[in-house]
Amino acid sequence: MDEGTHDLWDIRFVNRILNSMADGVFTLDAEGRITSWNRSMERISGYSSEESLGRTCQLLQCSHCFGKTCPSGFEECGILYKEPFEAKECQVRHKNGHEVSVIKNASVVRDRNGKAIGVVETLTDLTELNQARDRAEEARLRLAEIHRMDNLIGKSRAMQRVFSAIRAAAASDVTILVQGESGTGKELVAGAIHFNSARKDHPLVVVNCSALSETILESELFGHVKGAYTGAIRDRIGRFEQANGGTLFLDEIGELTPFIQVKLLRVLQERVIERVGESKQRNIDIRIITATHRDLYTMVREGRFREDLYYRLKVFPIQLPPLRRRREDIPLLVSHFLKTMNEKTGKHIQNVSQSAMRMLIDYPWPGNVRELENAIEHAFVLCNRESIEPMDLPIEILRPGQSVKCGSLPEEPRRPAVRRKTLTRETLLEQLDRCGWNKAEVARQVGLSRTAIWKYMKKWNIPLRGEEG
C-alpha cells in the first residue's frame, strides 16, 4: 500500500467513525469555515453536509456564541481566548426554525508551534433527555395530585382525626406507622404525608414487603454489588438509596422476616446501609413510613415481631378506621367514585338511587374503601341509565353473606313451587269459570304453561270464550 492509498484509507476510516457517533461533530479550518459535518450534525441541525461545508458555524445561531455575531475570520473567534472551554447547555437553531437544546463542547487544534489551525466542536442533542425530564415532572405532578390531602375523603369524626394526624406528621420528620385493615387507604395516607412535607420535591419510593421473598427483598431494599449472588451481573442500588432525600414507604411491614427486621432496625438507628456483597457503609437521608393491617403489638407479645423494632416504628402511629365505622362517609365516597368513573368511561351516571344507597350504607364492607370503589366500577359496567339501581350492584351486596364462585353466575331466586292439580275437562272448566276465562291465570293456578292450557282446551273442545253453557 503506497502512502497516498494509506492516507485515503485513514480518511475513510476516520469518516466512518465520525458518522457512527450519536453526537454531532464538525470541524472548522483556520478561516472559521466548516470542513467536516457528520451525519448526527445533519440530524440535529437539519443541514446536509453539502449545505454546511464552506460556511461558518453562524448557520447554527448558537445562543451561547462568543460574540453577538459570528466572526468571519477564525482569529476573531472568542474560543481562542476561552480555553479550556467548558461544555455548556445551549440552544441552536434548526434549519426549520425551531430551537434544539444541546450540550456544546469545543476544542482548538494547534500545530507543533502552538498556532491555531482549526477547531473541533461537538453537539449532544438533549431533545430526548428534556422530553424524559418533562415526562418525569408530569408524572411527579400527577403523583402529587393523587396524594393530595383532599383525595382522602371523609367528614366523619374518625377521618377528621386522621387528617389532623397527617398534618402533624407532615410537619415533622419522625418515623410513621400507619395501621388499618386492607383497603382503608394506608398508601394514600403515606403519600399525603410525603407530599405535604419538606421532602415533597424528592422521591416517594413504595415497597410491598409481603410480595417478595427474604433474599429478593434484601436486595430490593439495600441493593447489591456485582457477583454478590448468582445472577447479580452488575451493581444495583436499592430502594433506600433511591429514596435518599425523600420518603420510603414500607407496606405490610408485619410480613418481614426476623433477618430483615434486624437489618431494618439498624437502618432506623444509624441511618446507614450496606449493599449486599460489600462492607462499605453508605449514609442515607430518608423519612420512613411503614404500614400494616396486622396487630403488631400482639405479634410482639407472641414473639413474631421484634419489640425494639416495633417501638422504633411507632414513634407516631396513625390508625385508619374501617369503612363500617364511618358509614356517614359512604355517600361522599360514592359521589367521588361516580365522578372519576364518569371521566374514565365517558358515561354520564348522575347518582345512586335511594334503595341502592341504603344497600351500600348497610353493607359491612370487609374490603373497605377499595371494595366500595370496585362495587361502583361493577355498577358502571351494567348501568345504562342516569342512576345506579340495586340490580347494578354486586351479588354480595344484594345478598350479604353470599359470594359468587369464580367462573359461575349467581343462581336465580327460586320461585315457590306451584302444586299441580290433577287436570280433567271438568276441573279445567271450573278453573276457567273461577278466573273469568283468563288462560294465563288458570295456568298459574294449576302449575302449567299457558300453551298447555290452550292445548287442553283444543283437545277437549272447550270454546275459547265460554259459549258452552
Image (tube, grey):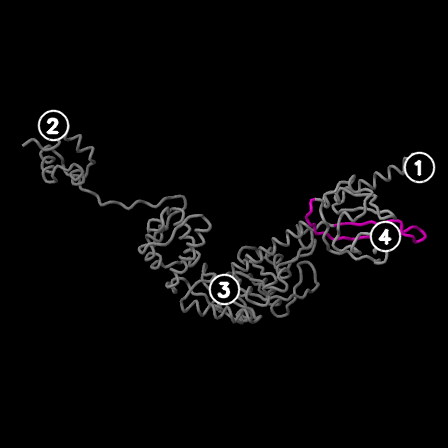
Which quadrant of the rendered structure holds the N terminus? top right
For residue 149, the mark is 3
User: CA separation, marks 2 and 3?
Assistant: 79 Å
The 10 Å Cα crowd at callout 4, few under 14, some 14 to 19, many 20 or more, is many
Residue type, mark 2 in image: Asn
For residue 177, the mark is none
Q: Is residue 26 above or below residue 65?
A: above
Left or right of 64: which side holds 365? left
Residue type, mark 4 in image: Val
Give how far across and how far down residue 396 sits, in percent.
Answer: 36, 52
Q: Start and end of the magenta stretch?
A: 96-123
Q: Earlier in the sequence, mark 1 or mark 4?
A: 1
The residue drawn where x is 43% and y is 54% is: 339
**Number of marks present in the image shown:** 4
Residue closer to the observer: 417 or 319: 319
Residue type, mark 1 in image: Glu
User: CA separation, marks 2 and 4?
Assistant: 117 Å
User: CA separation, marks 1 and 2?
Assistant: 122 Å
Can I make out residue 385 in this image?
yes
The 10 Å Cα crowd at callout 2, few under 14, some 14 to 19, many 20 or more, is few
Q: Earlier in the sequence, mark 4 or mark 3?
A: 4
Task: Write down the residue under mark 4.
Answer: 108
Circle 1 — which element? Answer: helix
Task: Write down the residue under mark 2.
Answer: 461
For residue 3, the mark is 1
Left or right of 17: which side holds 289? left
